[in-house]
Image (cartoon, rainbow, N blue to C red):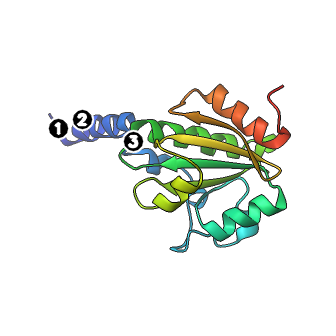
Amino acid sequence: MNLSRHLVIATIIGVTVGVGIGFFLPQNLLDSDRSGRSALESESAGRIVDFDEEHFQSLLAQGEPLIIHAHADWCAFCRAQEPTLISLSQQTELQGVHILRINYDRQRDALAQLSISNQSTLLAFHAGEEVDRLIGETDPQRIQRLFEISQSGTDS
């Protein structure tokens, strides 16, 4: 096989297992500093931002619509959820929803606080209260419904 065929096959395999997803996502949607805060906290709506307790509490206190994503890099379901979360966060009607990503392997206190026992868990908050959760869900329509519930507070 020539080099270009190897690259095509490697690219296909990488996208299939999620390794290459980062090449196709706008980097500004994944940016955060080491503290877990985005460069401008007020711009966290419509972006995936690493979980930080202070930021989380601030969003709850303000009653902002919020999705929590318990993510592990090794989790195939988590990798499958990520492009859907990013796509939904860019939809005009859903851009006010904040998305915080908890590192499943490193942020055990946050997982315990939110009663999360599985990676690939998605939680929806409305007006400071948890209103719904999904575990291992990759269907874009069900995830979109979770975003809508975080905005409205009800599953109507």
Residue 84, picture quadrant: top right
Q: Position of residue 62 (x, y in %)?
A: 83, 61
Q: Is residue 107 left or right of residue 141?
A: left
Q: Which mark is residue 2?
A: 1
Q: Which mark is residue 56?
A: none
Residue 75 is tagged as 3
Q: Quadrant of the C terminus?
A: top right
Which mark identifies residue 5? Answer: 2
Q: Residue at x 75, y 61 (%)?
A: 59
Of residues 19 and 69, which is closer to you in this image? Answer: 69
Name the residue: 68% across, 40% down.
Answer: 88
The answer to whether 151 appears left or right of 38 in the picture is right
Residue 22 location in percent, x, y? 45, 51
Give the x, y percent position of residue 143: 64, 33
Circle 3 crowding by C-alpha within 10 Å: few under 14, some 14–19, many from 20: some
Mark 2: secondary structure:
helix
> Which part of the image, by quadrant, shows the N terminus?
top left
Which mark sits nearer the N-terminus, 3 or 2? Answer: 2
